[in-house]
Image: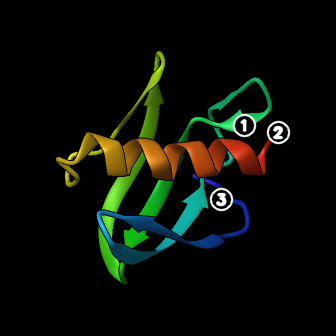
Amino acid sequence: MSILEEIHFALYHNGKLHAVTATPYLFPVENGMPACFNAKLDDKNIGDIKRSEHKWENENIADEELLSKIGSFLCSKYK
């Protein structure tokens, strides 16, 4: 699968600063934005983050609020 350039950012969640790296996959694309990203949270590989309907999904993050914040930032990079 082809990939695009990595996105690096930091965000605060529950009083902690988290470092995020997300590498978008070239396909599939929905409305000009990649639908799936391979991600690292605090230098730990957390696998793919995918947009499904109006919700972000990841098998390794149980905290939906944190996952939503990551997804919101990713969306902002493409709008």
Identified at 48% across, 19% down, the residue is 54
Relative depth, front residue between 45 and 20: 20
Contact (CB < 8 A) between labels 1 and 3?
no
- Name the quarter where the C terminus is drawn: top right
Q: Which mark is residue 3?
A: 3
Q: Secondary structure at mark 3?
A: loop
Identified at 72% across, 60% down, the residue is 4
Q: Residues within 10 Å of mark 2 (few under 14, many from 20)?
A: few
Identify which amino acid the numbered label 3 is placed on: Ile
The residues tagged by marks 3 and 2 sit, at their Cα atoms, a distance apart of 19 Å
Q: Secondary structure at mark 1?
A: strand
Identified at 62% across, 50% down, the residue is 74
Residue 18 shown left or right of residue 59 in the figure: right
Q: Which mark is residue 79?
A: 2
Q: Nearer the viewer, mark 2 or mark 1?
A: 2
Identify which amino acid the numbered label 2 is placed on: Lys
Q: Residues within 10 Å of mark 3 (few under 14, many from 20)?
A: few
Q: What percent of the width, then of the height, locates residue 3?
A: 65, 59
Q: Nearer the viewer, mark 1 or mark 3?
A: 1
Residue that label 1 marks:
33
Contact (CB < 8 A) between labels 2 and 1?
yes
Q: Secondary structure at mark 2?
A: loop
Residue 74 shown left or right of residue 37 in the figure: right
**Against 15, is 23 above or below?**
above
